[in-house]
Image: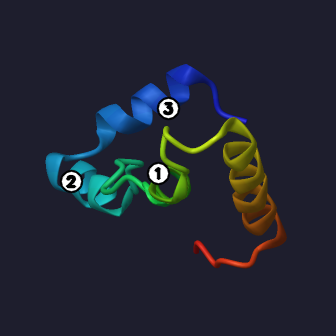
Amino acid sequence: MSSIEDINSLIGSLSAEQIKAIMTKVASKKRTSVDTSRKARRIALTQLYFDNAPRPKDSFEDYLNHSDGIREQIISGVEAWK
């Protein structure tokens, strides 16, 4: 295994063109895009719930039955959200 001094001397002996050729082949880890699919899925599920939630004038029992039904549909996979 090479020591740091060996690596430094090797880099010092390279010409500018050789360093440029090496750097063009070195891959960088720059992120070019951000995956927002998980966030979009969460937002869609929340929007589905609030679009189908019962109105405030309904009774609390109707609200519980309705919310439990929506929850069971989402868990069972009746609707595909992918």
Q: Which residue is mark 3?
A: 7
Tag 3: amino acid: Ile
Dot 1: element:
helix
Query: Residue 3 lies in what quarter of the image?
Result: top right
The dot on residue 53 is none
Residue at left offset 25%, top offset 60%: 21
Dot 3: element:
helix
Q: Which residue is mark 2?
A: 20
Residue 56 placed where, x, y %?
49, 38
- CA distance separating discs 2 and 1: 46 Å
Q: Nearer the viewer, residue 64 or 28?
A: 64
Q: Is residue 41 visible?
A: no
Of labels 2 and 1, earlier in sequence is 2
Residue at left offset 48%, top offset 46%: 55
Tag 1: amino acid: Ile
Tag 2–tag 1 contact (CB < 8 Å): no
Q: Quadrant of the N terminus?
A: top right
Q: Nearer the viewer, residue 20 or 9?
A: 20
Residue at left offset 50%, top offset 32%: 7
Q: Point out the residue furthest to the top here.
A: 5
Tag 2: amino acid: Lys
The nearer-to-camera label among 2 and 3 is 2
Q: Which residue is mark 1?
A: 43
* 42 displayed left or right of 23: right
Residue 76 placed where, x, y %?
83, 70
Residue 64 placed where, x, y %?
75, 44
Colour scheme: rainbow
Of labels 2 and 3, earlier in sequence is 3
Residue at left offset 56%, top offset 57%: 45
- CA distance separating discs 3 and 1: 51 Å
Q: Residues within 10 Å of mark 3 (few under 14, many from 20)?
A: few
Q: Quadrant of the C terminus?
A: bottom right
